[in-house]
Image (tube, rainbow, N blue to C red):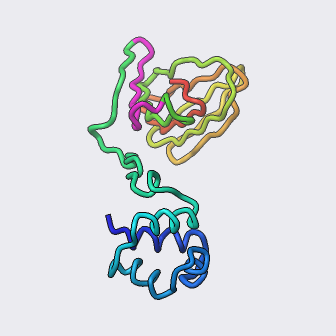
């Protein structure tokens, strides 16, 4: 870890100039400059004072941020086939059920349908990647084809159906997770 770079980043994040930070810590602007360029190292006491002026402490300063994965590949995808309903669900984000939203790709065979979902809080969005689908919201049906999208608040029972003769594929995002 480069202490000077991290101190500079904290100083800038706090909208302070080197002179302002130096004044707050009773140090010289030149000394702050040397620390930020890693030309010198502050004593532990000086570092504690600097970090206090920058709104942090030694533990937070030296803690590495948790590594959060944000890009997922084919190897991360989990799939479940339901031959009875004629669909295959691909969870494109692992453990998405623990998140606020759950993106899936659902493939519907001709005549196939998604699981029926009861009304719940939240929102749902879909984008038709391939084929044609019918979105059934209660007793109302909406048609969507490749390139179309849908968005609704799931206040009635709902599901997707493929009434076409070719496979349909939909990117479907539910919040909160419901698949």
Rendered location of residue 100, percent (x, y):
57, 35
Q: Does the magenta portion include 88?
A: yes
Rendering quarter of residue 169: top left
Rendered location of residue 27, percent (x, y):
52, 80
Rendering quarter of residue 23: bottom right
- Residue 87 shown left or right of residue 57 in the figure: left
Question: Farthest residue in the bottom direction?
Answer: 30
Question: Farthest residue in the top direction?
Answer: 84
Q: Quadrant of the N terminus?
A: bottom left
Rendered location of residue 19, percent (x, y):
57, 85
> Toward the viewer: 157 or 145?
157
- Residue 16 shown left or right of residue 107 in the figure: right
Asked whether residue 92 is in view, the answer is: yes
Which residue: 37% across, 46% down?
A: 69
Rendering quarter of residue 155: top right
- Residue 126 shown left or right of residue 30 in the figure: right
Rendered location of residue 117, percent (x, y):
60, 19
Q: Does the magenta portion include 170?
A: no
Asked whether residue 166 is in view, the answer is: no
Which residue: 44% across, 27% down?
A: 108
> Toward the viewer: 84 or 132?
84
Residues in magenta? Answer: 84-96
> Toward the viewer: 78 or 81?
78
Q: Is residue 70 above or below residue 27?
A: above
Q: Is residue 4 above or below residue 104?
A: below
Which residue: 39% across, 83% down?
A: 34
> Toward the viewer: 164 or 144?
144
Which residue: 58% across, 61% down?
A: 55
């Amino acid at each position: 870890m480069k202490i000077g770079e991290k101190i500079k980043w904290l100083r800038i994040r706090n909208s302070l100039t080197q002179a302002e930070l130096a004044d707050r810590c009773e140090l010289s602007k030149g000394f702050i400059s040397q620390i930020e360029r890693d030309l010198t190292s502050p004593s532990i006491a000086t570092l504690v004072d600097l970090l206090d002026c920058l709104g942090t402490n030694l533990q937070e300063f030296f803690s590495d941020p948790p590594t959060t994965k944000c890009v997922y590949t084919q190897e991360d995808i989990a799939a479940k086939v339901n031959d009875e309903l004629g669909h295959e669900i691909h969870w494109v984000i692992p453990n998405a059920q623990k998140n606020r939203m759950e993106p899936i790709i659902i493939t519907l065979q001709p005549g196939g349908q998604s699981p029926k979902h009861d009304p719940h809080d939240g929102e749902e969005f879909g984008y038709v990647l391939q084929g044609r689908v019918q979105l059934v919201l209660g007793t109302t049906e909406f048609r969507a084809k490749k390139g179309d999208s849908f968005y609704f608040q799931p206040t009635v029972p709902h599901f997707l159906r493929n009434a076409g003769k070719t496979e349909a594929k939909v990117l479907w995002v539910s919040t909160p997770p419901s698949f």
